[in-house]
Image: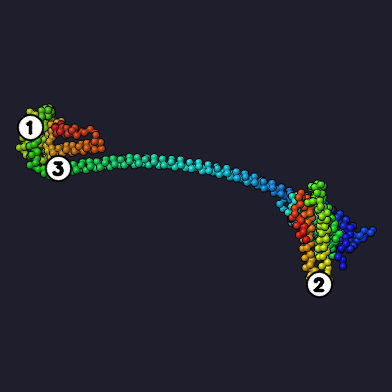
């Protein structure tokens, strides 16, 4: 255990040299590198912090925008809902109105059809009645009936009005003969009565021919030149059919619009006028 | 048996003798400096860092943290001195596992030289930090009567530093030497391993104590804790 002072001095120098060398090659470079890295990391961290703040700002802005958009969308939805409800109400009202009008039209049509059907039915019934009457009269037509017809014709001749007589007399003056047509042959006595009554009525001795070849006449007809006087059941039946048609037509027109002018009386007058000779 | 590298002369030239102490000190210095230079020549301040650089950074950071823990607020100021003490002693002791190598710290001359460096560094750091007057006043605290005791304390702790390191390292070498002659297998290996541990601990103790002395002298008011750490150092 001895100390060599020369060695001590040498070691002191060695140690100081080592301190300098290590300071030069170890501590300083390492500290510098670490400081640089820390600075870099610090920069990165501050950059990251700034970026995060930016991102947060952006996120906040986006959140606010989204909230505004949500609100706007909500408003639009409300508006659209209101509009839809209004539209639905309108459409419902329109539809109800349309349905109402269609129903009314349908009902009107139904009424018309029913009226038409009733009128057709009435007309058909009337025609059927006339037809049956015609058939019955034709079936029962015989000598007795012909005689009755002739007598009726005779009485008609006697009761001719003045205007008809004048017309017949004028016609007789120009014509050669008068023709009496019946559906069935009539007795000679009756013929004589008719001839006499005719000559009295027109005050002329005109020859009278009798024809009985017209089937279904069911009456008698007098023809002098252009003038004709006829009495027959067929004509009455025809007049009845015309009257029936007129009544039914009038009724049919009156049915859809009851406030229409009533033409029933005029029809009756026309019917009465048919009775006179033409 | 050589128990001190001072007596082992490696070379002699014109009356100048190169002892093993100085020779192996140069070896240790060369290793430390070349190793540091090789690594720090390719330093990276980016993200990808080489393992060697990481190792150096860990060492430097650990030393700096230790300096800071002692209670100084400027570790970079003391880093070269304290760090070199630690690294030199640790390297010198660790290399003792290499056959034929004699740790220079096993020489009282080396440890005395290091202790003298500490003895000089303590007032130097104190004076540069607080000024000469303030430093001198620390010797007469708490009263001028304490001046001789303070001076004795300075000398004695320097002596203690030198002898503690020398004794530990030398004893390790001597024990291994004795064991090799008594039980040549296995036991010397175990003692070498123990020697590595002891060597590192001694390096740590030496550096920390030096730092404690410097810190206590550099402070405006000496911390009584540092005296306790001085006593518990060994």
Task: Give the residue number, with chain letter if any, for mark 2.
Answer: B183
In the picture of the structure, the residue carrying the numbered disc 3 is A133
Left or right: A184 as drawn, with respect to B107: left
> Element at badge 2?
loop
Residue B137 locus on image (x, y percent): 80, 49
Residues at badges 3 and 1 in contact (C-beta under 8 Å)? no
Say which element carries label 1: helix
Q: Are marks 2 and 1 on the same chain?
A: no
Tell me where residue B203 appears, x and y as whole percent. 79, 59
Residue annotated with mark 1: A158
Q: Nearer the viewer, mark 2 or mark 1?
A: 2
Question: Label 2 vs label 3: CA separation?
Answer: 168 Å
Q: Chain of mark 3?
A: A
Depth order, front residue of A56/A244: A56
Q: Which chain is mark 2 on?
A: B
**Number of residues whose C-alpha sits closer than 10 Å to that of mark 1, classed few (under 14), some (14–19) or many (20 or more):** some
Counting residues from the start of the chain, the first of labels 3 and 1 encountered is 3
Tell me which residue sits at (19%, 38%) in the image: A244
Which chain does the numbered disc 1 sit on?
Answer: A
Placement of A88 over or under B224, stated as above or below = above
Give the quadrant of residue A156. top left
Marks 2 and 1 sit apart, C-alpha to C-alpha, by 193 Å
* The quadrant where residue B211 appears: bottom right
Instruction: Say whether residue A30 is left or right of residue A135.
Output: right
Give the quarter of the figure containing the C terminus of chain B.
bottom right
Q: Which mark is residue A100?
A: none
Instruction: Give the CA separation, mark 3 to mark 1.
Output: 28 Å
Residue B32 seen in the figure: no
Q: Is residue B78 left or right of residue A64?
A: right
In the image, what residue occupies the spot 12% across and 34% down? A222
Image x and y of residue A57, in percent: 60, 43
């Amino acid at each position: 255990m001895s100390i060599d002072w020369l060695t001590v001095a040498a070691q002191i120098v060695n140690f100081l040299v080592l301190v300098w060398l290590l300071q030069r090659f170890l501590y300083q470079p390492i500290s510098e590198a670490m400081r640089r890295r820390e600075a870099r990391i610090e920069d990165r961290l501050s950059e990251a912090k700034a970026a995060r703040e930016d991102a947060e700002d952006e996120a906040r802005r986006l959140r606010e925008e989204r909230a505004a958009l949500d609100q706007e969308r909500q408003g639009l939805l409300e508006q659209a809902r209101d509009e839809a409800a209004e539209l639905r109400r309108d459409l419902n009202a329109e539809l109800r109105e349309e349905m109402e009008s269609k129903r009314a039209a349908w009902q009107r049509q139904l009424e018309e059809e029913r009226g038409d059907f009733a009128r057709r039915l009435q007309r058909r019934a009337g025609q059927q009645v006339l037809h049956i009457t015609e058939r019955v009269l034709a079936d029962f037509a015989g000598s007795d009936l012909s005689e009755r017809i002739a007598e009726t014709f005779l009485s008609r001749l006697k009761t001719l009005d003045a205007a008809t007589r004048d017309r017949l007399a004028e016609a007789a003056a120009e014509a050669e003969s008068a023709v009496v047509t019946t559906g069935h042959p009539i007795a000679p006595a009756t013929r004589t009565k008719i001839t006499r009554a005719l000559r009295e009525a027109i005050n002329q001795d005109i020859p009278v021919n009798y024809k009985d070849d017209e089937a279904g006449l069911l009456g008698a007809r007098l023809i002098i030149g252009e003038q004709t006087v006829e009495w027959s059941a067929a004509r009455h039946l025809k007049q009845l059919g015309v009257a029936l048609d007129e009544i039914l037509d009038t009724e049919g027109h009156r049915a859809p619009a009851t406030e229409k002018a009533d033409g029933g009386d005029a029809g009756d007058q026309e019917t009465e006028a048919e009775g006179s000779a033409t | 048996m050589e128990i001190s590298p001072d007596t082992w002369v490696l070379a002699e030239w014109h009356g100048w003798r190169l002892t093993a102490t100085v020779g192996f000190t140069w070896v240790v210095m060369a290793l430390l400096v070349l190793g540091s230079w090789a690594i720090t020549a390719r330093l990276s301040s980016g993200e990808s860092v080489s393992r060697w650089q990481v190792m150096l950074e860990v060492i430097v950071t650990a030393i700096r943290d230790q300096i800071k823990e002692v209670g100084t607020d400027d570790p970079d100021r003391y880093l070269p001195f304290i760090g070199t003490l630690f690294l030199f002693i640790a390297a010198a002791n660790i290399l003792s596992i290499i056959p034929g190598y004699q740790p220079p710290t096993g020489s009282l001359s080396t440890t005395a030289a290091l202790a003298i460096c500490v003895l000089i560094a303590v007032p130097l750091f104190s004076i540069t930090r607080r000024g000469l007057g303030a430093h001198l006043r620390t010797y007469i605290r708490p009263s001028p009567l304490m001046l001789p005791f303070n001076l004795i304390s300075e000398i004695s702790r320097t002596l203690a530093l030198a002898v503690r390191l020398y004794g530990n390292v030398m004893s390790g070498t001597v024990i291994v030497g004795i064991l090799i002659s008594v039980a040549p297998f296995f036991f010397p290996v175990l003692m070498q391993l123990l020697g590595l541990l002891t060597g590192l601990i001694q390096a740590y103790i030496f550096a920390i104590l030096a730092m404690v002395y410097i810190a206590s002298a550099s402070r405006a008011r000496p911390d009584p804790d540092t005296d306790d750490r001085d006593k518990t150092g060994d």
